[in-house]
Amino acid sequence: MAKGKDLHTDLGLKEEDLLGMYRYMLLARYCDERQWALNRMGKAPFVVPVSGHEAAQVGSAWAFEKGKDVFCPYYRDMALVLVAGFTPKDIFLGLFGKKDDPSSGGRQMPAHWGSKERNIITGSSPIATQVLHAAGIAYSKKYKKADAVVGTWFGEGGTSEGDWHGAMNFAGIHKLPMVFFCENNQYAISVHESKQVAGSVHGRAQGYGFPGHLGDGNDILESYRLAKEAVDRARAGEGPSLIELRTYRHYSHTSDDDDRTYRSKEEVEEWKQKDPIPRFETYLRSVDLIDDAKIEAMREETKAEVTEGAKAAEEAEFPDPGTAADHVYGDLEVV
Ligand SMILES: Cc1ncc(C[n+]2csc(CCOP(=O)(O)OP(=O)(O)O)c2C)c(N)n1
Ligand SMILES: [Mg+2]
């Protein structure tokens, strides 16, 4: 592949795209650090960290058209939903279970992202169920001849579920306009990939009659390239693709997990050295888009946006307990 400026121009990315991508990576990272700190302060009961996955999520989300395409994410996809239209304040409204949480008005667990206006379909807690939802939505888009591509994201653990295989088979049979993204961080909570995945994730696509590709999920431009090719293919009516993006999570599975019991310090450190954010900074420097001063300014600006969003969400109202059953059981009255 071409080097330097040609690398992103060959991908059809403009300078504002690159800076936008970088900004979203920073936003996600700072939201993550903030939510982790809030958890340790006892202010946020449950946190699902994203750090480490930013390139895979921002790069893949960038290939979709907002307002047209549909996102079926999973709990780790905070950077993805930021690209799809969530603000840092929205992220914290969900974390605190506040009334204006866009996902569920404070009814769901945090990280069950959903927003009708942003075409983000809320996920259920059982893993990989969103993959079936995505296939159903993609079928409806095809049936209605709508110009829309459906993206769905999941971990490699999710690919052991029957739901995942059912969705893959259905998508292959009907040549659905969708893209399957596996964020392979090598662990399903404490279970290593070697005990979870026989063969490879991307290799499974062949069995369902469509292409599967493997990419470096810590490389945002590679994540974007693979996603864009797959989204273009889906939009052209050529059917689904599966993209496996290899990455690593920097923190525990959730705030309720202690990863020291199953990952060595050395392994975590080794992967932190491959942090996707400094790696993208190296590229941005190489094409003269940023320097130390610009990095500092963008970091300060995004950090301030996150601090402000967290503060506004902390001060926001909780839902009225009298509305607890609204949108849950139809029009039941609370007695
Ligand atoms: C059907 C089902 N089984 C088990 C769980 C418990 N569980 C929640 S997350 C998770 C691990 C999923 O790992 P992976 O798909 O690799 O995603 P990651 O968290 O690593 O991003 C498990 C087993 C669940 N939510 N649903
Ligand atoms: Mg995993």
Image (cartoon, rainbow, N blue to C red):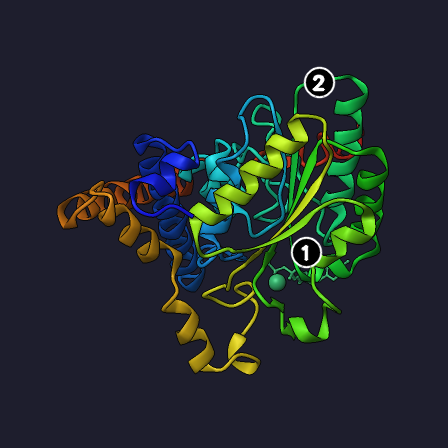
Assign a secondary structure to mark 1. Answer: helix
Residue at 75% from the left image edge and 69% from the top image edge:
198
- In this rendering, the answer to whether 265 lies above or below 146 is below
Residue at 77% from the left image edge and 52% from the top image edge:
206
Residue at 62% from the left image edge and 45% from the top image edge:
112
Q: Which label's residue is closer to the chain start, 1 or 2?
A: 2
| Left or right for 159, reference 225 | right
Query: Looking at the image, which is closer to me, 273 or 312?
Result: 273
Question: Which amino acid does the dot numbered 1 rest on?
Answer: His
Q: Do the residues labelled 1 and 2 touch (CB within 8 Å)?
A: no
Q: How crowded is mark 2: few (under 14 residues within 10 Å), some or many (20 or more)?
A: some
Q: Name the residue under label 2.
A: 146
Query: Looking at the image, which is closer to me, 51 or 224?
Result: 224
Query: Looking at the image, which is closer to me, 265 or 306?
Result: 265
Cα separation between marks 1 and 2: 28 Å
- In this rendering, the answer to whether 115 lies above or below 160 is above
Q: Mark 1 points at which residue?
A: 202
Position in image of residue 177 (x %, y %)? 71, 31
Number of numbered discs: 2
Q: Quadrant of ligand 1?
A: bottom right
| Left or right for 22, reference 164 | left
Q: Quadrant of residue 240?
A: top right
Position in image of residue 271 (x %, y %)? 43, 70
- In this rendering, the answer to whether 196 lies above or below 102 is below
Position in image of residue 329 (x %, y %)? 80, 33
Assign a secondary structure to mark 2. Answer: loop
Q: In which quarter of the image is residue 122?
A: top right
Position in image of residue 83 (x %, y %)? 46, 36
